[in-house]
Image (tube, grey):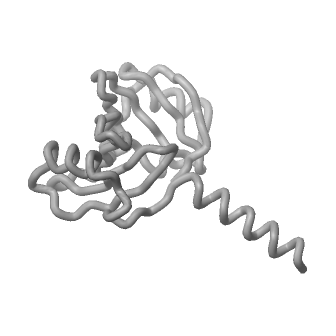
Amino acid sequence: MKKTFLLIALALGVISVQAQNLDESKVPADAKTAFKKSYPSITTVKWEKEDGNFEAHFKDGAAVETAVYDATGKFLSLEKVIASTGLPKAATDYLAKNVSGKRIQEAAEIKSADGTITYEAEVNEVDYIFDAKGNYLKQEADED
C-alpha cells in the first residue's frame, strides 16, 4: 500500500512540475508589466509557469492566445490557437500520411520573439511541430 501511495505521489509531482497554475501574485512583476504593456485591454489572464517561464493565457477578441515571458519580462513567444484548416498544406499532408485516421485535437501558430513562425498540431497527446512552410521539424509529448 505504501508503494502504491508513493508511486501516485511521485506521478502527481512530475505532472505538477510540467505546468503549474499560478496565482497572479506569484508572477514576477516584470513579466506582468510586460504583458500589460503589450495587451493593455486584456483584464482576464490565467498564468502558468512552465520550464521556468511564465505563460499568460487569455482571449483577445475571439482568439485564444498564450504570451510567454521569462522572469525578467522578456517576451519569448506568442501562441494563437487556430483551426486545423489553418495549418500549412505540407503539415496537414504530413499528418495525413503519418498519423492517418487520428484527429487533430488542437492547432496553433507560434511566433517567437525574433519573428520566426512555427505551427503545432496536437494529435493523441503528441505535439507535431512544423516550420512556417509546413515542413516537419519534430514531435514532443504534449505538456498540457
Q: Say if residue 109 shows up in the picture.
A: yes
Extreme residue toward the bottom, this view: 1
Which residue does the image show at 45% across and 53% down from the upper left? 49
Total marks shown come to 0
Quick one: 90 or 132, which is closer to the camera? 132
Which residue does the image show at 59% across and 50% down from the upper left? 125
Quick one: 96 or 39, which is closer to the camera? 39
x and y, in percent, of residue 73 in the image: 29, 41
Position above or below: 137 against 125 = above
Which quadrant is the N terminus positioned in?
A: bottom right
x and y, in percent, of residue 137 in the image: 53, 23
Quarter of the rendering containing residue 37: top left
Q: Say if residue 82 shows up in the picture.
A: no
Position above or below: 106 against 14 = above
x and y, in percent, of residue 83 in the image: 33, 45
Which residue does the image show at 49% across and 31% down from the upper left? 129
Which residue does the image show at 52% across and 23% down from the upper left? 136
Specify whether 62 is left or right of 57: left
Quick one: 65 or 89, which is closer to the camera? 65
Specify whether 75 is left or right of 61: right
